[in-house]
Image: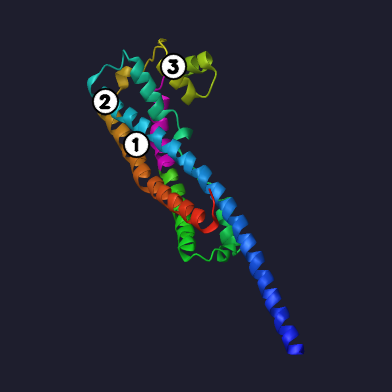
Amino acid sequence: MLFLAVFCGFLAENFREHKVEQQRAKELAISFYDELKRDSATIQTVQMNRLKRDSSFTYLKKYFRDSSITNCSKEFSIDFNYAFIVFGSYIFEPKDAILDQLKNSGSLRYFKNTELQKLTGDLSVAIANIRTRNKFESDFLDLYLTPYLVKHNDIEFYDNISNRYKILLVYALSAYEKSSEVFPFHFNKPDDFDKTESVNLTGMYQLRCWGTSIKQYADYQKLNTRLLEELRIDYKLK
């Protein structure tokens, strides 16, 4: 009888621990799912913005080759700012608070699905790759693009846009693009302007940004989608 009582107590405790782990797994799964869903929406917007900027890069390369920089068009001024001045709306910075909690606390063991565990590990690697690649882009901006802008950019155009619309530049440019207004853009030091250098600078920056979009960002999107699917199936989430 004593053995039976101890054995039953053991089973009860084991069952209780199992239920607690299941509940904890569900709570973590919901939090992780919400984090992934928010990032899924964010990166889709960022990727669309980057496609628009890629078009700006292509336009600028052709403009630098073929057109006058002493009489810059409205389209040039807009694409120049989309390509070289606006920055934040093109950068995806993934959230990983719940992911870090899963890894650092050992809570990942609560996910019994081995595919879910593998995908979570792969996502951690993908996020590290994104941060490395973001720095790769940022370094180019600091080393090459900023000195170029200090030399040639028309800061008065930026001031006019900002004062007219009084919103963040990316939204001000969109409003200006749709309007009939025209603010002149005067390329500084036109006599000291090297067309070949400008085409090459634009092309190199375009290649870096395009590489990020089609590799690191795209890899993250695929993993994000697969993780959301696994979590939906395993934990009946919507």
Direction from residue 25 to residue 179 in the image, left or right: left
Three-letter residue code for mark 1: Tyr
Q: Main structural element of the magenta stretch: helix, strand or loop? A: helix
Mark 3: give few (<14), some (14-19) or many (20+) Cα within 10 Å: some
Q: Are marks 1 and 2 in contact (CB under 8 Å)?
A: no
Quarter of the image that includes the N terminus: bottom right
Q: Which mark is residue 205?
A: 1
Residue located 47% across and 44% down the image: 40
Residue located 70% across and 79% down the image: 10
Q: Tell me: residue 110, above or below residue 76.
A: below
Q: CA distance from mark 1 to mark 3?
A: 25 Å
Horizontal and vertical percent position of residue 157: 44, 16
Q: Label 1's element?
A: helix
Of residues 121 and 204, which is closer to you in this image?
Answer: 121
Q: Which mark is residue 97?
A: none
Q: Quadrant of residue 76?
A: top left
Q: Which residues are magenta?
A: 137-154
